[in-house]
Amino acid sequence: MHEYPITQQIIKIAEDHAREAGADRVKTLRLVVGDYSGFIGDSIQMYFDVISEGTLCEGAAIEIERVKPKLKCEKCGLYFERKLFSFACPACGGEGRPTEIGKEFYIDSIEVEKN
Amino acid sequence: MHDVIRLDVKENIHSENDHIADHVRQHLSEDGILVVNVMGAPGVGKTTTLKNIFPHLRKAKPYVIEGDIESDIDTVDLQNMGFDTYQINTFGACHLDAPLIHDAIHKMDFDKEGILFIENIGNLVCPAEFSIGEHIKMLISTVTEGSDKPYKYPLAFEKADIILINKCDLLPYVDFDEDFFMKGVRAQNKDVPVFKVSGKTGEGYREVAAWLESRNPD
């Protein structure tokens, strides 16, 4: 459900940047979405097709780069993906602490067409 | 002939929400209002927690925004008890966002310094992702939900500034592994204060109220 307002926001940001560059159409949007961002790529695509009608983004392709969350071991400094029900470092058994890796949710770039 | 150009955007999709959230926080800070985002799954006792905290507030006046998908049951209840309460219905949306809170606070009257409790939609996932202008995220978990919640919903536990474990009067009747629960909490949130409370007996809320009153809204 919450992908709807977020998709409106994605279209707005892309349109703002396209207009600023004097473009007529957005061809591609590249998003970076961490798995802890809570957003589902298929849902964004579904809403995008509906909401983008009549905007500069109509017909554009969405490419989503997913990022797996990583913890950082407080003992040995290793970045690792955690296993279910555990925060332990696979190398030394130390405690993994949350990092910003996996929480990404931004538009990386867009491709636009200009006459 | 069309030219295709690549434009670097690098813009956070939450940026507009976060901008409005900052505005809400600043506005209420200036009025001496501490904002607490109350989060937890349906049925953990979010409204019950508020009712139990309020009598222990020594100086701060409590204000409430109730977020529900539908109905105003909790709001009517709190209003009948004499608390300034404003209802937001999201009609399906799974969390509150900053624009909703922005509209609500402009309809409320903050006549005295105090604490605004914003009861988010009952949900352990989405509310953790959206800033609504709070100074403090208060997460309520319960012994009846089970001790694996910090492992299954890590973001909510990582972002919490205070955690309440409610329904502690039921500890003798349920298999709640407190050590396992706390291990999961501490792995993600080393120093977060954790309070054991019971909405049934009133245990623990005096300490929660004192902790909240020791925070500054800036």
Image (cartoon, coloured by chain):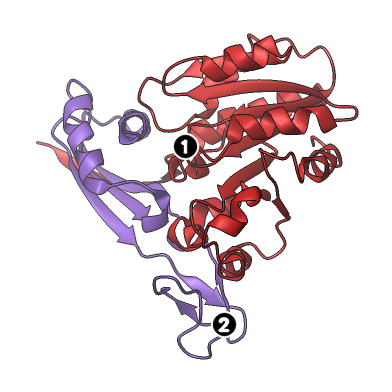
Vertical arrangement, residue B167 with respect to residue B150, above or below = above
Indicate which label's residue lies in the foreground, 2 or 1: 1
Give the quadrant of residue B190.
bottom right
Residue A13 percent location from the top left of the image: 37, 33
Vertical arrangement, residue B129 with respect to residue B119, above or below = below
The quadrant of the rendering that contains the N terminus of chain B is top left
Q: Which residue is mark 1?
A: B42
Chain B on-screen colour: red
B12 or B27: nearer the viewer: B27
Q: Residue at x 85, y 41 (%)?
A: B210
Residue B214 percent location from the top left of the image: 86, 42
Chain A on-screen colour: purple
Q: Residue at x 84, y 16 (%)?
A: B112
Q: Residue at x 13, y 34 (%)?
A: A59
Label 2 resides on the chain identified as A
Question: Can you tell which mark lies on residue B172?
Answer: none
- Label 1 secondary element: loop
The quadrant of the rendering that contains the C terminus of chain B is top right
Q: Residue at x 75, y 33 (%)?
A: B53
Give the residue type at disc 1: Pro
